[in-house]
Image (cartoon, rainbow, N blue to C red):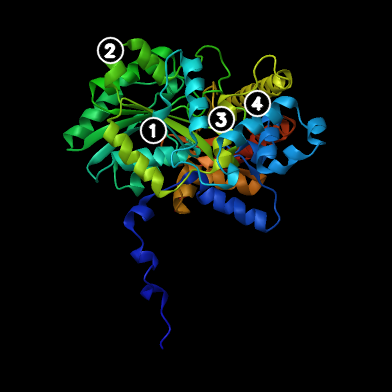
């Protein structure tokens, strides 16, 4: 038999689905791959490209892990030593979950999540917003990403269906829209107002897309923002709710950073709460889906893959279809569901673990706030760098002014200028970041995203590395543009 050449393979690169090839995911793109190569060679890398708190040394909160330890090793509940090693409320919670999760964490659950935990989520939402939440409209998922993908999958019927996404955006959206053959319709955030909303421009973008014949069906917003770190005011959220209702768009509220708010100027207000407070016709007319996760906030449990979505005012037959899509996956992972339950139902005042849990949480949030401030100030102290404040979320997104010679050198190397800059940053310092082009940025501007997550003790070193690199880079390219 003759050997099969690589282009003859059934799944040769040329024959991979075009939608798969079109999907781009910069967070694990060129810089990440170069960083992984460095690791293989034994070189140092500081991974500030992904919002992965435990990956950068954050310790898990104690109480949720105590409960999960008992749940995953239930025989410990029969061991008399357990009462001396675990607080009573962790033991009680583990027993309650075991009583309510048939088969424990090793069994498939209902495809949209365990009903007891969905109830815990509903009560959390009700307490947060002051408005009722229906557990039947809350689906538990493997992280918020899966929920977002399921919704986009349901929304996008073909290449003429568009979804509005903020620019800069988190590339889960652009990648998934590409994967489902839909059309990405960007609406630009205004950097000069701290990445604020510009509804006039947003409307213009919608009108232009519709004029091109697209059927624009949804709008995503991320609050607090990734990569931009801004927190929306209540008025902004209200404007978006009205905008989506008036323009017949499903509102997709990505609220995964709701606990990561470092400035009191704009405390977090959920889209659900605003919708309920606006009353009719929004309360029954706006199709709203909100996303949350255990990966962010103070839990930072990215590896547990726990998330949920709450759907409001969806046609019950559509909910059935989404249920069916979830059923194809059989069941979201059960430890992740438990993590969601614990996030939504933490120790209460009077419980043995309450004080220590609250102290751990407060210390973590205070540290994130200090790190956010430190990075913003460090970037703004550099010539040619300007950085909006990280009011929330886990990122800093500075704008860099690159010397024309650097831009020319990047072009000569066949790289986008911000990619060129981030590659140089990685090779000279080991800092792995994500170029702004991976998120979208205004034409002619260059940015990069870094997380605020390196340990506080390492932050001084990170800042120094960055400052030294930036000054050296600018100096290197500050001469006239070389003739190519
Ligand atoms: C804005 C935003 N949405 C959704 C996600 C997905 O989170 P996960 O799938 O880990 O829950 C992330 C993760 O970084 C994010 O930044």
Pointers 3 and 1 in contact (C-beta within 8 Å): no
Which is in the foreground here, disc 3 or disc 1?
3
- Disc 3 to disc 1, C-alpha distance: 40 Å
Residue visible at 61% across and 46% down in the picture: 426
Which is in the foreground here, disc 4 or disc 3?
3
Residue in the foreground of this view, choosing between 47 and 116: 116
For disc 1, the marked residue is: 442
For disc 4, the marked residue is: 371
- Disc 4 to disc 2, C-alpha distance: 42 Å
Residue in the foreground of this view, choosing between 108 and 275: 108
Residue in the foreground of this view, choosing between 377 and 352: 352
- Measuring from the top left, give residue 396's x and y in whole percent: 55, 30
For disc 2, the marked residue is: 280
Q: Is residue 137 left or right of residue 72?
A: left
Earlier-in-chain disc, 4 versus 3: 3
Give the residue at the far bottom of this rendering.
1
Q: Is residue 206 left or right of residue 294?
A: left
Residue visible at 31% across and 40% down in the picture: 321
- Disc 1 to disc 4, C-alpha distance: 27 Å
Residue 207 seen: yes
For disc 3, the marked residue is: 341
Earlier-in-chain disc, 1 versus 4: 4
Which is in the foreground here, disc 4 or disc 2?
2
- Measuring from the top left, give residue 420's x and y in whole percent: 51, 47
Residue 78, labelled with which disc?
none
Residue 268 seen: no
Q: Is residue 177 left or right of residue 414?
A: left
Mark 2, secondary structure of its residue: loop
């Amino acid at each position: 038999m003759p050997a099969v050449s690589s282009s003859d393979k059934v799944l040769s690169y040329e024959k991979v689905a075009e939608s798969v090839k079109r999907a781009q995911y910069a967070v694990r793109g060129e810089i990440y791959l170069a960083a992984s190569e460095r690791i293989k060679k034994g070189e140092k890398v500081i991974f500030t490209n992904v919002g992965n708190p435990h990956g950068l040394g954050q310790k898990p909160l104690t109480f949720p892990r105590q409960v999960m330890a008992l749940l995953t090793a239930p025989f410990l509940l029969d061991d008399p030593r357990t009462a001396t090693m675990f607080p009573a409320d962790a033991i009680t919670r583990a027993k309650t979950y075991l009583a309510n999760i048939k088969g424990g964490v090793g069994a498939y659950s209902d495809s949209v999540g365990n009903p007891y935990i969905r109830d815990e989520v509903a009560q959390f939402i009700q307490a947060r917003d002051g408005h009722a939440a229906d557990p039947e409209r809350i689906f538990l998922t493997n992280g918020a990403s899966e929920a977002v993908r399921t919704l986009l999958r349901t929304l996008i019927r073909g290449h003429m269906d568009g979804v509005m996404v903020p620019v800069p955006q988190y590339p889960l959206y652009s990648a998934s829209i590409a994967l489902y053959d839909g059309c990405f319709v960007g609406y630009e955030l205004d950097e000069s107002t701290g990445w604020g909303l510009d509804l006039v421009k947003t409307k213009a973008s919608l009108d232009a897309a519709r004029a091109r014949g697209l059927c624009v069906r949804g709008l995503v917003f991320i609050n607090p923002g990734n990569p931009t770190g801004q927190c929306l005011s209540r008025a902004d959220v209200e404007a978006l709710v009205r905008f989506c209702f008036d323009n017949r768009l499903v509102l997709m509220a990505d609220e995964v950073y709701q606990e990561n708010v470092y400035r009191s100027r704009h405390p977090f207000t959920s889209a659900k709460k605003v919708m309920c407070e606006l009353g009719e016709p929004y309360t029954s007319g706006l199709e709203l889906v909100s996303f949350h996760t255990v990966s962010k906030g103070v839990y930072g449990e990215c590896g547990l893959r726990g998330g949920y979505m709450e759907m409001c005012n969806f046609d019950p037959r559509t909910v059935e279809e989404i249920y069916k899509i979830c059923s194809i996956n059989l069941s979201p992972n059960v430890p992740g569901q438990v993590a969601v339950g614990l996030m939504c139902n933490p120790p209460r005042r009077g419980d043995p673990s309450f004080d220590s849990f609250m102290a751990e949480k407060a210390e973590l949030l205070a540290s994130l706030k200090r790190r956010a401030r430190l990075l913003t100030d460090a970037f703004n102290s550099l010539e040619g760098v300007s950085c909006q404040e990280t009011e929330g979320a886990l990122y800093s997104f500075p704008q860099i002014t690159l010397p024309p010679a650097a831009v020319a050198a990047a072009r000569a190397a066949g790289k986008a200028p911000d990619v060129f800059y981030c590659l140089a940053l990685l090779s000279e310092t080991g800092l792995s970041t994500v170029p702004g082009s991976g998120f979208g940025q205004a034409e002619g501007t260059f940015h990069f995203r870094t997380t605020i997550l390196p340990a506080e003790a390492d932050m001084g070193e990170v800042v120094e590395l960055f400052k030294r690199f930036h000054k050296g880079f600018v100096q290197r390219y500050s001469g006239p543009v070389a003739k190519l």
